[in-house]
Image (spheres, rainbow, N blue to C red):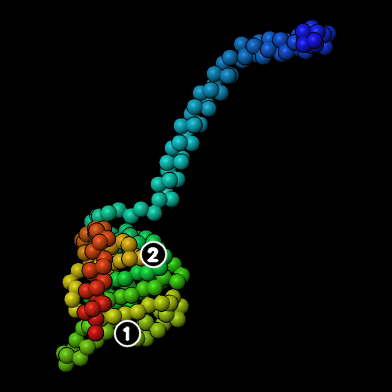
């Protein structure tokens, strides 16, 4: 019964039409071999270009910060850009330990994400009469918190170096006070996150 169907006039006509289609396709490809070749070359070039574009986009989208580096005198913009990139990484908290933090430092933290809590540990400075003087005044704190809550400033005399802790997961040692970024040559390095717990314990336990 199947052989009768395959040998029917309609089946024969369909088979002839298929063969003619293949013949026409073959003639087309032979007549346009150069065009087809060029299309293949263009397709390969496009694939290579797409791969390069994907690589570039991946690098642009990457939020990775260099593990270490040096900024030289006069690199004001670059040094500030580094700190701003670190500040923008925080999703929950930022802790800065900087004995010479000033209200200008708060300008950097104004770029943080909404809801990120900022704690600054700094040193009390004394005038000629040994009266403590705070570089960041209560008025500065109140003004900042009115627009970018929440900032807390604590005083600690234990630290010499500057540290920045991001979300209790990333720890950076910064060789210059944030108020002096780019003013002099300084280095920075990403440290072992296991030190965060000890540094925080030292900071909070030594705070009056």
Task: Identify the residue under disc 1.
Answer: 137
Q: Taking 22 as reference, is 151 above or below it?
A: below
Q: Quadrant of residue 142?
A: bottom left
Crowding at dot 1, Cα within 10 Å, few <14 / some 14-19 / many 20+, comes out as few
Q: Quadrant of the C terminus?
A: bottom left
Closest to the camera, between mark 2 and mark 1, is 2
Tell me what residue is drawn at x 41 percent, y 82 percent: 143
Tell me what residue is drawn at x 39 percent, y 61 percent: 89
What distance separates the C-alpha of mark 2 from that of mark 1? 25 Å
Tell me what residue is drawn at x 23 percent, y 78 percent: 205
Q: How many marks?
A: 2
The numbered mark, 2 or 1, whose residue comes first in the sequence reads 2
Q: Taking 180 as reference, is 68 above or below it?
A: above
Tell me what residue is drawn at x 41 percent, y 70 percent: 116
Q: Quadrant of residue 204?
A: bottom left
Say whether residue 31 is left or right of residue 171.
right
- Residue 104 is situated, as x and y percent measured from the top left of the image, at 33, 74
Crowding at dot 2, Cα within 10 Å, few <14 / some 14-19 / many 20+, comes out as many
Q: Secondary structure at mark 1?
A: loop
- Residue 112 visible within the image: no
- Residue 106 is situated, as x and y percent measured from the top left of the image, at 35, 74
Task: Identify the residue under disc 2.
Answer: 90
Q: Quadrant of residue 115?
A: bottom left
- Residue 189 visible within the image: yes
- Residue 92 is situated, as x and y percent measured from the top left of the image, at 40, 68
Q: Which mark is residue 79?
A: none
Q: Taking 67 as reference, is 201 above or below it?
A: below
């Amino acid at each position: 019964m199947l052989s009768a169907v395959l040998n029917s006039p309609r089946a024969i006509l369909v088979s002839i039409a298929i063969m003619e289609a293949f013949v026409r396709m073959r003639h087309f490809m032979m007549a346009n071999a150069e065009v087809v070749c060029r299309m293949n070359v263009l397709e390969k070039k496009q694939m290579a270009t797409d791969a390069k574009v994907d690589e570039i986009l991946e690098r642009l989208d990457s939020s990775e910060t260099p593990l270490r580096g040096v900024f030289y005198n006069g690199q004001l913009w670059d040094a500030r850009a580094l700190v701003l990139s670190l500040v923008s990484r925080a999703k929950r908290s930022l802790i800065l330990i900087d004995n010479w933090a000033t209200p200008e430092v708060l300008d950097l933290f104004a770029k943080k994400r909404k809801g990120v809590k900022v704690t600054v540990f700094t040193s009390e400075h004394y005038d000629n009469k040994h009266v403590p003087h705070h570089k960041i005044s209560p008025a500065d704190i109140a003004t900042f918190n009115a627009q970018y809550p929440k900032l807390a400033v604590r005083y600690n005399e234990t630290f010499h170096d500057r540290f920045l802790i991001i979300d209790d997961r990333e720890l950076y040692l910064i060789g210059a006070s944030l108020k002096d970024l780019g003013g002099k040559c300084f280095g920075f390095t990403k440290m072992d996150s296991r030190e965060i717990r000890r540094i925080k314990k030292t900071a909070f336990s030594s705070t009056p």
